[in-house]
Amino acid sequence: MADKVILVTGGSRGIGAATARLAAQQGYAVAVNYVSNREAAESVVADIVRGGGRAIAVAGDVSREDDIIGMFSTVDRELGTLTALVNNAGILGRQSRLDEMTAERINQVLLANITGSLLCAREAVRRMSTRHGGPGGAIVNLSSMAAKLGGPGEYVDYAASKGAIDAFTIGLAKEVAAEGIRVNAVRPGLIYTDIHASGGEAGRVDRLKDAVPMKRGGTAEEVANAIMWLVSDQSSYATGTFIDVSGGR
Ligand code: NAP
């Protein structure tokens, strides 16, 4: 069993995959969660194993409590005591105005992004908190610059879900600060990943990049660096805090 065990939800692609790879380089045994793209998750695991690291792919939909519970049990059994959670899995719907959105779509986004992150954090606290006999640990939540910008005309529901992530980060950080757990968040800006295609505009970052003060989109690796700094002991006195990785946007 490894000393340092990390679960990255949505670790099969994009920011999560970059985080999983970086965590392995930093000596973590890595659980790479995915919901449907098993091939992508297995490819991240294969890269890590080729590099001499330890990793497993774990299927599970963060919109489903029973999947979350099963996923954490698999990590307990196969990798050992969890010491870090990256609440990275997140979705958005097709770009649209609020007056065109269905309740079903809004509920899907809120369920995956908010309830999923809360329940994964709950399972992590049950394992990490010194109150429960755990070793302490770190939780990093993926918020978004949308929490501040609001996502008008595209996805105010998604932006609202990320605003909830910000509030939850502050509250949980205070709740478990004396129990050895730090809770922080990263707010990415426009990052080159598949998420924009899932919103219906694969080229969204390139369309908007000139409005970014740094005049470019960011990479998943640039976000992963901030996430893993917050996971690491380098940030040992930081909790309830946020890093905006957005090129100044
Ligand atoms: P992405 O490229 O679309 O990848 C999404 C990942 O999440 C995939 O690994 C996917 O698994 C997984 N996933 C989706 N729904 C899931 C569910 N219900 N249960 C478990 N896993 C699920 O996304 P990304 O751009 O890397 O985004 C990662 C996080 O950063 C999200 O929280 C997102 O909101 C946030 N963020 C991204 C940007 C950006 O510009 N990219 C900006 C701000 C914030 P499969 O491979 O199995 O589908």
Image (spheres, grey):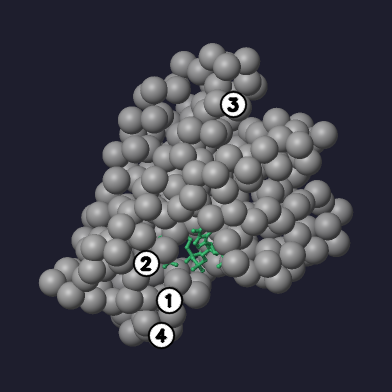
Q: Give the quadrant of residue 44.
A: bottom right
Which numbered dot is residue 203?
A: 4
Other residues around mark 2 within 10 Å, as few (<14) / some (14–19) / many (≥20): many
Where's residue 158, x and y in %? Answer: 30, 61
Secondary structure under tag 4 reads loop
Residue marked by disc 3: 128
Mark 3 or 4: the one toward you? 3
Return the disc, 3 or 4, that comes first in the chain's sequence. Answer: 3
Is ligand 1 within 8 Å of the beta carbon of the residue shown at mark 2?
yes
Return the disc, 4 or 1, that comes first in the chain's sequence. Answer: 1
Other residues around mark 1 within 10 Å, as few (<14) / some (14–19) / many (≥20): some
Other residues around mark 3 within 10 Å, as few (<14) / some (14–19) / many (≥20): many
Q: Is residue 172 left or right of residue 153?
A: right
Residue for point 42% across, 40% down:
118
Mark 2 or 4: the one toward you? 2
Residue marked by disc 2: 92
State yes or no: discs 1 and 2 in contact (Cβ < 8 Å). Answer: yes
Quadrant location of the N terminus? top right
Q: What residue type is disc 2 on?
A: Leu
Q: Cα distance, mark 2 to mark 4?
A: 16 Å
Front-lying residue, 212 or 230: 230
Which numbered dot is residue 198?
A: 1
Front-lying residue, 57 or 228: 57
State yes or no: discs 3 and 4 in contact (Cβ < 8 Å). Answer: no
Quadrant location of the C terminus? bottom left
